Image: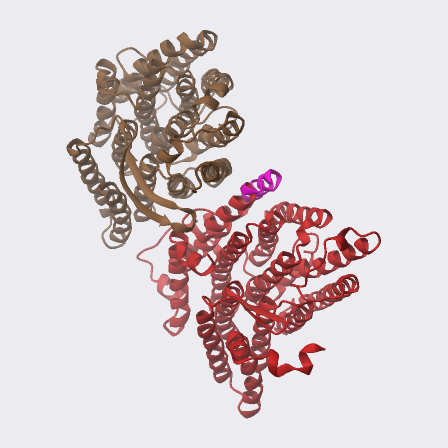
Chain colours: A brown, B red
């Protein structure tokens, strides 16, 4: 109930921010910020005070929705979704902060879309009726596309279109798989059901489940993204406004990983096991290819975008290793990458605001005029290439250690990605902050310090005390 | 014939009750003629027509839950046909409202227009209830001929003659094909009723079987012409573009619903699907329509043309339901078809309503014939309600959740998945992917530019005070689209 109210409240806050901006200029961002902070607190209090044991999936509410298909409105929480929702709240607040001055046109509508996306993402993480899951999956997509298409950079409509088509087509495949599984349930038990806990009880023969799994896998692989269905990502990330990139990299990609965990691996364990070699190959190719491509980019945001592909490859490799160490590593990587890529995209946004370019050739020597920014940039680049002491290191280390026990050959090649990430990380830092000063920029302001500081703090906290996350079992 | 000799025994009061909605429309059409003789006033006849349609709709609503009933050999009224007729009446009412403002923008009194509209609705009403090839042909002709009159109605328009003639000639050809097909079928089976039991042997009999199948193909080609399914779609873009927008609206809604329902009725009753050749034909129609419609729509600038191509694709999607229909799941087939049609109609009415309103407000209040993509520029910031309605309509056509179109697509995908029609599913997915390539840019176009909250021009561009009904219609359709998209059970209870 509380969760439903939170989602509705987000929708309502978005609507009122939109209205309010028309009457009082500048009120939308405050409203959005306050609403997010308030609702995040409500969520935290709700989870803390709940008597449930979230190690297992706890169904919170079940209401009949579309009776002709036996579709329900049912939501549930477990440790995995709680962690990801917490990440969503943090990044949502960061998003509002980074858009503070960046968004100048149609401000009210912007915050409406932002809050709607957040509501959709939370819906994705809590829905346990598959139809409802699909519903939220698309609901988060629409406002996100609007954010890219309306407030993005020069080539925004193309990027938004590409993003939407990739996701939509792949999710139609998932829809077919959902329908297929629902009707398989009908065949086996005599009742049509889209209810996830019901599905977990199904015993699907491998000959059918491999196809069903594949339908789900494609949708999540596009979202994750994995080579060869990654090509929407560099465009979408580059063209989106800063908050859009932060949200995309920070949370939206995680919905893909979340889907892989919950609806591919847990639902079709046998089929996934059979599919593991292919998935691992794709993962390794993503890691190496992402790192290689990142190195070749001239565009700050594009570079970070390709690095995301590389990092998400580690997640996929770890997930398909079927090893609890790797699994925990994958989840730490998810959180760590959410924070670090959000940080890098925020930095890109800050630089863009100062020099109106994302091109690395226009940058250089910023350290002299903006040492604080340089310090943060170094730290975040360090996080991205897995510097010990920061969260990403823990994630990648655990992923690789876990995966090595199962498929050593893949893991060895994947580890090359670490070298690659060090190279592009340093390229990123050196070309922008070192060398001859091309222009003077203003150093970080209080608001920006707050953004960077909080992100770095969290990266450090997880990096130095990983038990924060590792103490949870995440359903294994 | 048997019907004529003992009418008393065959026709009872309960039958009258069952076809009362159609009778009201027929009676209304006659009265309208008298009304024209008595007093020529646009206002009067518009009000009169809407009262007739409204009454018919009210009576029809009552029939939705009634058990099926055979009304003579010709007609059969059941929940499905009543639901389809409700859709027709609702579309006609909306089109009537749009026509009224459209006709007011031109001088002259236009009584005939309303008469034709009533006749067309009557044709649709006969079609959806027909259970016999004779009534089918009657309804078909009634609908086509009045539509021909409507298509060429706007004489001052540059497109009027072209589109009128195109439609007249092709439509006449299609109906003669159909008639020939019916004759062939009759010559083999000796019965024109849908519910006649035809022995399976006939389908495969040497000589006769081929003749029968040829008849079937001719018959179906007449119907799919009206449904603008490829390869019988060539008239669609020109006629959609050239007709007055309210007429295009009628063509996209009334005509499509009536034709599709009667096609399904006929095919289901006659078990034609048992014929492999026939299924193959439908399959190729569906696949070409889905791909061709979507691909051709990609580069269209003119909105009505674009929608014409998209309608080709949508009819292709809907044809899937017929192809995968099986004897066990007939109720579900009907449910899917009617839901999809309902979704399609709500979406089309929304979009055409916006187009019609934009035409009226066109160049500084002057009527604007062509609405292209560029006219949508910044619509969301100028008149948010129009843009919202249009966006909902487009999203519904694209099949995105929150809209009815998604539920409709869900139905189709479910049907196809149950029948393991993987190739059709693949084409559907590819088609929807291509379709996003033109729906989304339209939506993006509406968001271009910036909002000027303080700008005073907003007030004058918005709907004028005198257009309260339009405004009400726009808001109610926004609400309708959203509510039915989130709670589809409201519709399911009528067709379940």
In this rendering, position of residue B195 left or right of residue A459: right
Rendered residue at 43%/38% (across/down): A189
In this rendering, position of residue B298 left or right of residue B452: right
In magenta stretch: residue B425? yes
Q: What is the x, y in percent for residue B457?
A: 37, 62
* Above/below status of B275 relative to B264: above
- Mark count: 0
Q: Quadrant of residue B76?
A: bottom right
Q: What is the x, y in percent for residue B12?
A: 55, 80
Check the image and name the residue furthest to the right: B207
The rendered magenta stretch, by its main secondary structure, is classed as helix
Quarter of the rendering occupied by the C terminus of chain A: top left
Q: Quadrant of residue B304?
A: bottom right
B327, A183: nearer the viewer: B327
Residue B301 in view of the camera:
no
Quarter of the rendering occupied by the N terminus of chain A: top left
* Above/below status of B421 relative to B371: above
In this rendering, position of residue B384 left or right of residue B306: left
């Amino acid at each position: 109930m509380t969760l439903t109210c939170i989602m509705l409240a987000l929708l309502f806050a978005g609507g009122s921010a939109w209205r309010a901006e028309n009457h009082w200029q500048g009120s939308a961002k405050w409203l959005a910020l306050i609403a997010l902070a308030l609702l995040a607190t409500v969520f935290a209090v709700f989870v803390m005070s709940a008597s449930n044991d979230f190690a297992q999936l706890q169904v919170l509410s079940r209401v009949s929705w579309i009776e002709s298909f036996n579709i329900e409105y049912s939501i549930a929480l477990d440790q995995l979704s709680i962690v990801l929702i917490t990440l969503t709240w943090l990044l949502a607040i960061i998003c509002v902060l980074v858009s503070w001055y960046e968004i100048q046109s149609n401000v009210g509508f912007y915050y409406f879309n932002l809050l709607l996306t957040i509501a959709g993402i939370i819906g994705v993480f809590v829905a346990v009726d598959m139809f409802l899951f699909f519903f939220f999956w698309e609901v988060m997509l629409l406002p996100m596309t609007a954010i890219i298409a309306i407030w993005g950079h020069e080539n925004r409509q193309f990027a938004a279109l590409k993003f939407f088509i990739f996701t939509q087509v792949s999710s139609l495949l998932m829809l077919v798989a959902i329908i297929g599984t629902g009707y398989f349930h009908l065949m086996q038990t005599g009742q049509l059901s889209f209810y996830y806990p019901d599905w977990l009880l199904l015993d699907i023969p491998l000959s059918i489940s491999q196809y069903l799994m594949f339908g789900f896998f494609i949708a999540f692989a596009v979202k994750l993204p994995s080579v060869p269905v990654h090509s929407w990502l560099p465009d979408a990330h580059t063209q989106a406004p800063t908050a859009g990139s932060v949200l995309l990299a920070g949370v939206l990609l995680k919905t893909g990983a979340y889907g892989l965990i919950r609806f591919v691996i847990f639902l079709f364990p046998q089929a996934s096991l059979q599919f593991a070699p292919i998935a691992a190959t794709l993962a390794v190719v993503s890691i190496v290819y992402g790192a290689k491509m990142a190195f070749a980019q001239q565009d700050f945001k594009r570079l970070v975008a390709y690095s995301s592909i590389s990092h998400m490859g580690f997640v996929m490799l770890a997930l398909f290793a079927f090893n609890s160490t790797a699994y925990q590593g994958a989840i730490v990587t998810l959180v760590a990458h959410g924070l670090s890529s959000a940080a890098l995209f925020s930095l890109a946004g800050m630089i863009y605001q100062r020099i109106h370019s994302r091109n690395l050739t226009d940058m250089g020597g910023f350290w002299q005029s903006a040492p604080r920014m340089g310090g943060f940039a170094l730290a975040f680049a360090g996080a991205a290439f897995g510097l010990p002491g920061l969260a990403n290191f823990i994630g990648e280390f655990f992923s690789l250690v876990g995966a090595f026990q199962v498929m050593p050959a893949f893991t060895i090649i994947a580890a090359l990605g670490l070298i690659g990430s060090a190279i592009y990380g340093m390229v990123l830092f050196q070309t922008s902050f070192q060398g001859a000063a091309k222009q003077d920029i203003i150093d970080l302001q209080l608001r920006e310090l707050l953004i960077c500081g909080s992100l770095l703090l969290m990266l450090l906290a997880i990096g130095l005390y990983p038990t924060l996350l590792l103490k949870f079992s995440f359903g294994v | 014939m048997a019907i004529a000799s003992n009418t008393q025994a065959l026709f009872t009061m309960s039958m009258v009750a069952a076809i009362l909605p159609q009778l009201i429309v027929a009676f209304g059409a006659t009265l309208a003629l008298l009304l024209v003789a008595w007093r020529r006033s646009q206002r009067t006849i518009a009000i009169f027509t809407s009262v007739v349609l409204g009454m018919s709709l009210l009576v029809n609503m009552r029939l939705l839950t009634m058990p099926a009933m055979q009304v003579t050999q010709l007609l059969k009224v059941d929940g499905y046909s009543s639901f389809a007729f409700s859709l027709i009446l609702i579309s006609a009412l909306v089109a009537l409202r749009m026509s009224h403002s459209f006709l007011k923008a031109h001088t002259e009194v236009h009584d005939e227009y309303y008469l034709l509209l009533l006749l067309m609705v009557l044709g649709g009403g006969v079609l959806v209830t027909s259970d016999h090839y004779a009534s089918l042909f009657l309804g078909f002709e009634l609908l086509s001929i009045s539509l021909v009159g409507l298509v060429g109605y706007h004489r001052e328009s540059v497109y009027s003659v072209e589109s009128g003639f195109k439609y007249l000639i092709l439509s006449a050809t299609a109906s003669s094909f159909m008639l020939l097909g019916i004759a062939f079928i009759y010559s083999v089976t000796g019965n024109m009723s849908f519910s006649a039991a035809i022995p399976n042997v006939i389908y495969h009999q040497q000589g006769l079987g081929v003749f029968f199948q040829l008849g079937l193909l001719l018959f179906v080609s007449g119907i799919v012409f009206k449904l603008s399914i490829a390869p019988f779609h060539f008239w669609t873009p020109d006629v959609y573009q050239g007709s007055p927008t309210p007429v295009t609206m009628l063509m996209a809604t009334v005509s499509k619903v009536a034709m599709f329902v009667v096609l399904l009725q006929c095919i289901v009753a006659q078990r034609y699907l048992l014929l492999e050749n026939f299924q193959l034909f439908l399959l190729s129609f569906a696949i070409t329509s889905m791909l061709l419609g979507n691909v051709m729509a990609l580069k269209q600038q003119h909105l009505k043309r674009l929608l014409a191509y998209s309608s080709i694709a949508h009819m292709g999607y809907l044809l899937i339901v017929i192809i995968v229909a099986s004897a066990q799941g007939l109720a579900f087939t009907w449910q899917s078809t009617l839901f999809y049609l309902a979704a399609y109609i709500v979406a089309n009415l929304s979009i055409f309503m916006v187009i019609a309103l934009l035409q009226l407000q066109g160049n500084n209040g002057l009527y604007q014939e062509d609405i292209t993509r560029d006219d949508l520029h910044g619509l969301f910031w100028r008149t948010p309600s129009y843009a919202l309605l249009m966006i909902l309509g487009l999203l519904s056509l694209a099949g995105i959740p929150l809209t009815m179109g998604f539920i409709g697509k869900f139905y189709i995908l479910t049907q196809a998945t149950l029948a393991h029609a993987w190739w059709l599913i693949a084409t559907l997915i590819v088609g929807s992917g291509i379709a996003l390539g033109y729906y989304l840019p339209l939506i993006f176009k509406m968001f271009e530019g910036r909002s000027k909250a303080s700008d005073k021009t907003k007030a004058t561009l918005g709907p004028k005070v005198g257009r309260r009904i339009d405004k009400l219609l726009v808001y109610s359709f926004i609400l309708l689209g959203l509510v039915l998209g989130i709670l589809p059970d409201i519709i399911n209870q009528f067709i379940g």
